[in-house]
Amino acid sequence: MNRPRRRPALQKQASKVGELLPRAGLHPAVQAWVAKRRQAETWGVAFSGGADSLALLFLLWVHWPERRERLVALHFNHRLRGRESVADEKFCRRVCAALGVRLRVGRWPGRHTGASEAEARTARHGYFTREMKRLRCKSLWFAHQQDDIAESMLMRLARGSGAGGLAAPRPVHGTDDGRVHLRPLLTLKKAELVAALRKAGTKWREDSSNVRGDFFRNRIRRSVLPAWITAAGRDALAGAALSRERLEEDESALEAWVEAFVPLGHDGELDLQNLAGMPRAITRRALHRWLLAMKQQTDLSRQGFEILLAAVEDGRATRFSLGRNGFAVIKQGRLTFQQT
């Protein structure tokens, strides 16, 4: 008897969330991207059942009603929390059924007790990639918000990331295989999403593992971020989001500079004469592009990269090991790859 009433009740809650979080408040870069897309395209939506992903699904359903039939929610069951993981999946099924949204579910086979955050993320994104290919879908929506920006920034500062790493997560991010990742909630805070869901009378799933300090992100979220916000005495989350925007602008400008002035040759060679007098940031990116363009896998460490970078800047003749597959060779002002 409860099931027939659940569909209109949840749809009403979704509409309320849409009223509280209007379309105009979503990231403008994402809105500009949507304006250029065909209505027939399928949109994949990463859906864990948590507050952020539920708010995202609601907002897509409310603000783009003409695309509801082309929405596909993707839920990945990591199977790490026993009955809780099963309950997450059931919750996602109920929500999608009530909204009339297709749901695809993937499960992590085998046992992964003690799996790291990176391993779980790799498995999840691997499922997303495979499912997107099956669906012939090019766009995948994520529910990252301003708290995630600050957390990611603090985590990446700890490992010495440059502008490219600190500019993540991006609102519109193209992948190497032609897909696009979209994050419209980067203009909003976690508290704003939760407040809207509560006012709408909506329930969501909580991941109990988030309260433990097993993962670096959890430790940042629980201990570092609150203290940082308090110490700032201002809207530190908005400040981090603004810094991310500026860093993305700088990174895009530098990449465009590299593309224009330091192109790779058809044979994969890098003409070092094009780098003469260039700022080190340009040389660094040119070398990074050269490494990415090689089909052979390398095991170059961070320290090794810095040594090779210095050799490229100096232009001196060099034969530098890139691992078991070959060498980077600098000769007569050109950087080439030489197989072992």
Image: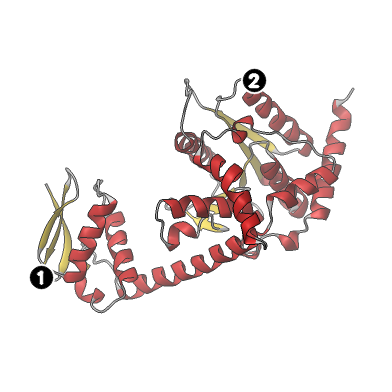
Q: Position of residue 100 (x, y in %)?
A: 75, 38
Question: Mark 1 is on which residue type?
Answer: Gln
Which residue in the structure is indicated by mark 2? 83
Residue located 53% across and 37% down the image = 131
Residue 38 seen by the camera: no
Relative to 322, does residue 306 appear above or below in the rendering?
below
- Quadrant of the rendering where the N terminus is positioned: top right
What secondary structure is marked by label 2? helix
Checking the image for residue 203, the label placed there is none
Q: Position of residue 129 (x, y in %)?
A: 49, 41
Relative to 98, does residue 162 appear above or below in the rendering?
below
Label 1 – label 2 distance at C-alpha: 64 Å
Relative to 299, does residue 28 appear above or below in the rendering?
below
What secondary structure is marked by label 1? loop
Query: Residue 220, located in which quarter of the rendered image?
Result: top right
Say which label, 1 or 2, has the lower sequence index: 2
Residue located 45% across and 34% down the image = 119
Question: How many neighbours does mark 2 have within 10 angstroms: few (below 14), some (14-19), or many (20 or more)?
Answer: few
Which residue in the structure is indicated by mark 1? 332
